[in-house]
Image: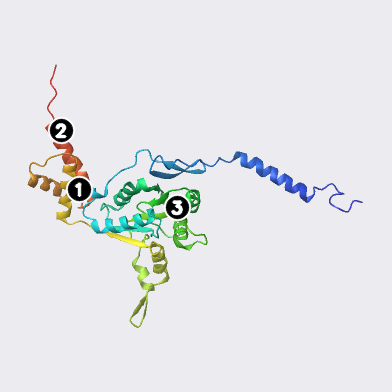
Amino acid sequence: MPNTARERGAPSFDGVIERVEALLARVETLLPAPAPMPDFAKTIAFRWRKRGGSAAIVPVDHPHRIALKDLRGIEAQMELVDANTRQFVEGVPANNVLLTGARGTGKSSLVKAVLAKYAAKGLRLIEMEKQDLVDLPDLVDRVAEAPFRFILFCDDLSFEADEPAYKALKAVLDGSIAATSENVLIYATSNRRHLMPEFMRENLETEYVGDEIHPGETVEEKISLSERFGLWVSFYPFDQDHYLAIARYWVERLGVTIADAATMEREALQWALSRGSRSGRVAWHFARDYAGRAMLKGRAPKSKR
């Protein structure tokens, strides 16, 4: 009687390996091909997009361009972010940046403005949606060898508990065994200082040891993510004078001469009251409305034939 696998006709170990390799080769032909890298020299802004099971860096054909000089009321914040970005572009140490605070005060506009300023020196921006942050390690690896500097931009970022993207971002910022590429920084904006909701009940975990306050584990966990950003930049609501100054600037920037400043200011304040906010964004929206109405009013009516 045959007493070995070979004598009984069973496949040998080498034969099994060959069959597995052949099967893997057939499966690989069914997988989508890796997306080609874009030409980073042709445009300055990109998006990380996932379609049909594959992910790609997609160029933005018409990026929003804004100059630093067009941002008003945030001079101190502008100086911090501009200095950090210059360090990054020049190849010296720089920090990941978290921009937090009131909505509509210019957080994302400031990121776009420094991109426009330093694009000629090799700065590029790749925007990622929150749910795609799980792909951060893959994206960092893809651009690691490119001869450009990349800001990975996450706008209006916030997390709920146990989201997988939260852990991915935390690992890339400071908690992974692999070092982040020298040509990549993360800039994120958020209305939440610590990127996660904070609840009253979490304060009950706080311990008091003499005169020292020791936050509970839940609070410490939430703070641990925002602390991984080396530079915090805070934005605050504008007062009435700042709001009106921004509105006047944009009306004139759009090419309209203000004939009656008092009337324009009254309309700007009514606009802000209807929106419940005196932010730079609200001032920009008012300026577009005011300038558009003024331009139409100034046009001569077309003659009838």
State the residue position of label 2.
296
- Amino acid at dot 2: Leu
Q: Earlier in the sequence, mark 2 or mark 3?
A: 3
- Cα separation, mark 3 vs mark 1, equals 32 Å
Task: Tell me the number on the disc at residue 133.
Answer: 3
Label 1, residues with CA under 10 Å away: few <14, some 14-19, many ≥20: many
- Looking at the image, the residue that sits furthest to the bottom is 210
Whether residue 193 is visible, yes or no, is no
Task: Tell me the number on the disc at residue 66.
Answer: none
- Looking at the image, the residue that sits furthest to the right is 1
- Amino acid at dot 1: Ala
- Cα separation, mark 2 vs mark 3, equals 45 Å
State the residue position of label 1.
283
- Residue at 33 percent across and 61 percent down: it is 232
| Secondary structure state at the residue bearing disc 1 | helix
Q: Earlier in the sequence, mark 1 or mark 2?
A: 1
Label 3, residues with CA under 10 Å away: few <14, some 14-19, many ≥20: many
- Residue at 40 percent across and 44 percent down: it is 46
Q: Is residue 21 above or below residue 82?
A: above
Give the left or right position of residue 87, taking residue 21 as reference: left
Quadrant of the rendered structure where residue 241 is? bottom left
Nearer to us in this view, 62 or 94: 94
Quadrant of the rendered structure where residue 48 is? top left
Q: Earlier in the sequence, mark 3 or mark 1?
A: 3
